[in-house]
Image (cartoon, rainbow, N blue to C red):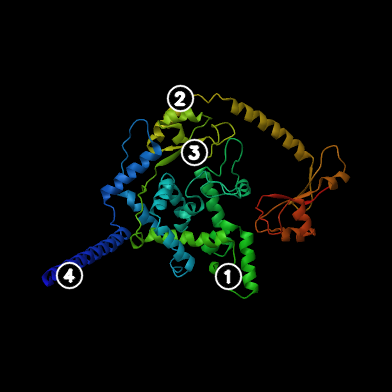
Amino acid sequence: MQKSHMNKINKQSFICALCAFIFLYGYCSTVTLGASAYQRAPMTNQEVNNQTRDILSNIFKPKNPVEINSTQSSVEIWTRVRARLHLGTTQTTQPLFQRHVKSFSQHQDYINKVIKNASPYFFYILEEVEKRGMPSEIALLPIIESDFNPNTLSHAGAVGLWQIMPTLGKMHGLKQNAWYDGRKDVYQSTKVALDHLEYLHKKFNGNWLLAIAAYNCGEVKLQRAIKQNRSAKKSTEFWALKLPKETTHFVPKLLALAAIIKSPKQYGVVLPAIPNKPVIARVHTGKPIDIAHAAKLVDISETQLRRLNPGFKKSMSANTPLHLVVPIHHAENFKEKINKTAPAKTAAPTTITATTTKAAKSSTAQAKATTKTSNSDVTVVSSSKTTSKSNKASGKTHTVKRGESIPSISKKYKVKISTIVANNNFKNQDAIIQPGQKIVISKG
């Protein structure tokens, strides 16, 4: 009886020990696996080249297979980017910076998605940023603005990789009509965005964080926040300003993403490869051409050609820029074929030309009947049949200049703020107004 009892105890002890061993082994294995998953091993050159080939193949999908030479240059673009990442070196202790670093580092799938979106355009944008002597963070802005998706539309009406508002686009001469939107054109919109960022950088005394914040919320709101802090004898650095929630997070997001790109291993992130060489080219067609026909000449699908040319809402016409973005390995061949191709025979160009002609005649007639006051920003519009008394009836409008706000305009014309707000159906005096926008000062 005693021996049997002892055997029973020994069996229970053995089972307990075995369970404890299994638990400890499993725990250690889990911890080790977790650490190795966070600190991923760097990709080999072959893996990088294969990944680059896959990315480019998914973008262009040539009907006839084309060999894409992806070499070690594919990984060098990130080295090139890191060399000019300067803005976040002293911001690492900021809570919002740390918060967004953690968020990005935990979402490898998001990193993969946005870099895949960026892969056709990134080399071109980085080149343009470097030509202007800007920091590399500026080339990363479209990730924060639009996930590098040129078709992104914000609730406020901003469009494209750089999220350009209609008024800013018009001020810089971007075409926006029923057939084409230059804000989606990667080449055109990049120039406008970089021009505007250079202006803001100069406006805010060479402070890139303030310039980037102003790009997001508008220079008037940023100036107002700086003025409030100065009045309260507080710091006017970005981190101390009271700004809209989106802007408050916008700058830290950009700096966090730049930090991860600078040290991806530190944060357990793998950066998909982007070729450090051009993969697209813009070809001047010299004449309108049907997009579907152009796709056949380029040897890619119409869907893929439209993806590279998101500015075109319909087919190319006389009312759109006469250039197409194509994969660079087909550019020369496309140039040769385009010279042998007749212009597209579509109804749209004829309609557009006719409409444009009528609009031009109408504009000319109206221009002759337009009288400008001593203030070049105010135009009193009158018809040819009216007298000077009817000038008052047609009202006054004002074209917004950079740096102006509703209060400053009301002061300029000695009109109540409430009157301007009511005349233009604004919510309040803090409503966003953009340079180039026309607002009603007084109604007839």
Q: Which residue is mark 4?
A: 9
Quadrant of the image occupied by residue 69: top left
Measured Cα–Cα span from mark 1 to mark 4? 74 Å
Identify the element where label 3 is drawn.
loop
Residue marked by disc 3? 309
Q: Give the residue at x 26% y 47%.
A: 46
- Which of marks 1 and 2 precedes in the sequence? 1
Q: Disc 2 vs disc 1: which is toward the camera?
A: 1
Residue at label 1? Answer: 236
- Marks 3/4: CA–CA distance: 78 Å
Pointers 2 and 1 in contact (C-beta within 8 Å): no
Residue depicted at x 33% and y 45%: 52
Amino acid type, callout 2 = Lys
Q: Which residue is mark 2?
A: 340
Instruction: Specify the amino acid type for callout 4.
Output: Ile
Q: CA distance from mark 1 to mark 3?
A: 41 Å
**Can the viewer see residue 98 in this picture?**
yes
